[in-house]
Image: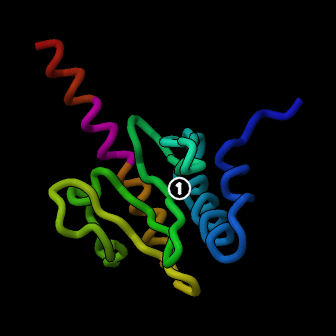
Amino acid sequence: MTTPDPVGERIEALPGWRGDTLRRVRGLIREALPGVQESVKWAKATSPGVPVWEHAGIVCTGEPSARAVKLTFPRGASLPDPAGLFNASLDGNARRAIDLPEGATLDEAAFRYLIRAAATANEQAQAARKKHRRT
């Protein structure tokens, strides 16, 4: 019996470059964070949902749109981004995103670094919450 793979199913349902982009991104996330938890969230009648990768909280989401695949990092504003990957949602206090339009290249090493930094930020925030609850 095979294990359900809602993220894989969601990616496979995407035609063309959007599916290819999310498939490649998923591989990079799994390389950077072996054992990362995957799910599809926010599904409703008008949307099949969004792939989400989590480690001590949401690391990033991958949302396909007509113009780009948007990779959103909820804690992105606090993450180091020396390669300048963030190119969207730059105005907010917390999140940042990477928009990957058709044909875009992604600095894979910098992206894996960003994924690991997001996971570390989640771990630190989780530890701080636990410490705060004990005091």
Q: Is 71 on the left or on the right of 50, as rendered?
A: left
The residue positioned farthest toward the front in the image shown: 45
In the image shown, does 41 or 96 lie closer to the viewer? 41
Location of the C terminus (image quadrant): top left
Say which element carries label 1. Answer: helix
For the residue marked with disc 1, what is the amino acid? Ala
Q: Is residue 72 above or below residue 91?
A: above
Taking 49 as reference, is 88 left or right? left
Query: Which residue occupies the foreground of this view, 109 or 3?
Result: 3
Is 97 left, or right, of 65 in this rendering?
left
Magenta span covers which residues?
119-126
Residue drawn where x is 49% and y is 78% of the image: 67
Can the viewer see residue 80 in this picture? yes
Q: Would you identify the image quadrant in which residue 120 lies?
A: top left
Query: Where does the N terminus fall, quadrant-wise?
Result: top right
Residue 38 lies, with reference to residue 132, above or below; the image says below
Q: Is residue 69 magenta?
A: no
Residue beneath disc 1: 32
